Image (tube, helix red, strand yellow):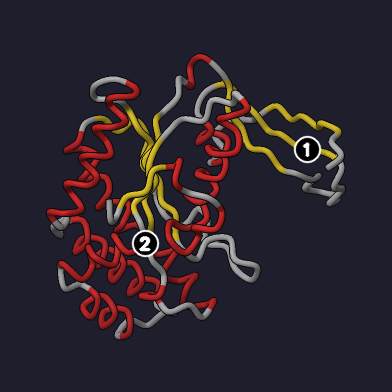
Amino acid sequence: MQHIHSFSELTLNDIPLVGGKNASLGEMYNALTPLGVRIPNGFATSADAYRHFINHNHLHEKIESALEAMDADDVDALAETGARIRAWIAHAELPADLVQEITDAYDRLEAEYGTNTDVAVRSSATAEDLPNASFAGQQDSYLNIRGTHNLLTTCKQVFASLFTDRAISYRIHQGFAHMDVALSIGVQKMVRADLGASGVLFTLDTESGFRDVVFITAAYGLGENIVQGKVNPDEYYVFAQY
């Protein structure tokens, strides 16, 4: 496939291809699956798939012109311009070859996990987690998406989220050209959050910077609840020497 890469094909060397998040998922899938750690399978669209979509709908210059004409310090103008660009993308047409590749990749997940399997559809920008900037959390993710039609619609929503008000403003103030940042979409099998816990792991103590502990925050249910601050998670410190 030209625009789709399964997790089994991805490593941390593929950040320019699928962004930091999806490259990390691929690295984790390949490194931990042979050790018996059950990483949900999935696939990622390439950064070039996003560019293909934008060019197919002749949106590059249209988006660039709208952003150049906007007063970055005018909050109302930012909101209006961002909403207009997101609407252009949400109502645009996915190229036929990209539709076919996403459909085929989802069919393979259905063959592995069952018909109409539920997936998380997540954003992974090519400029995420740089040494001098972090774009993580600025784009949207969608959970419990089922069926090809819903997946294709959600993919456009994820593409559109590259132009949230927050993301536009951050790029302007960090000096990043809007059209130089591309977006990869990660599609990953959902897990049964009602049967276990989820959490966030840091490889150091976030308050002191001490390197010899792993700091984990965890709670029952979806990890999204922890990330968004909806629950008060349990905290664990595990001594670990690397």
- Report the front residue among 83 and 61: 61
Which mark sits nearer the N-terminus, 2 or 1? 2
In percent of width and height, residue 43 lies at 37, 42
Compared across the picture, whether 89 is left or right of 17 comes to: left
Label 2 Cα neighbours within 10 Å, binned few <14 / some 14-19 / many ≥20: many
34 on left or right of 241: left
Query: Would you say 53 lies left or right of 133 here?
Result: left
- Which circle marks residue 47 in the picture? 2
- Residue at 32 percent across and 52 percent down: it is 158
Where disc 2 sits, the SS reads: helix
Q: Above or below — where is 188 with respect to 38?
A: below
Name the residue that disc number 1 marks: 214
Q: Residue at x 29, y 80 (%)?
A: 64
Q: Are marks 2 and 1 in contact (CB under 8 Å)?
A: no
Q: Quadrant of residue 33?
A: top right
- SS at mark 1 in the image: strand
How far is disc 2 from disc 1 in space, using C-alphas? Answer: 32 Å
The location of residue 77, given as percent across then percent down, is 32, 74
In x, y percent, where is residue 187? 36, 41
The amino acid sitting under disc 1 is Val
Q: Quadrant of the C terminus?
A: top right
Residue 41, numbered label: none
Of badges 2 and 1, nearer the viewer stands 2
* Figure check: 79 above or below 239: below
Q: Residue 88 lies in what quarter of the image?
A: bottom left
Q: Residue at x 45, y 41 (%)?
A: 8
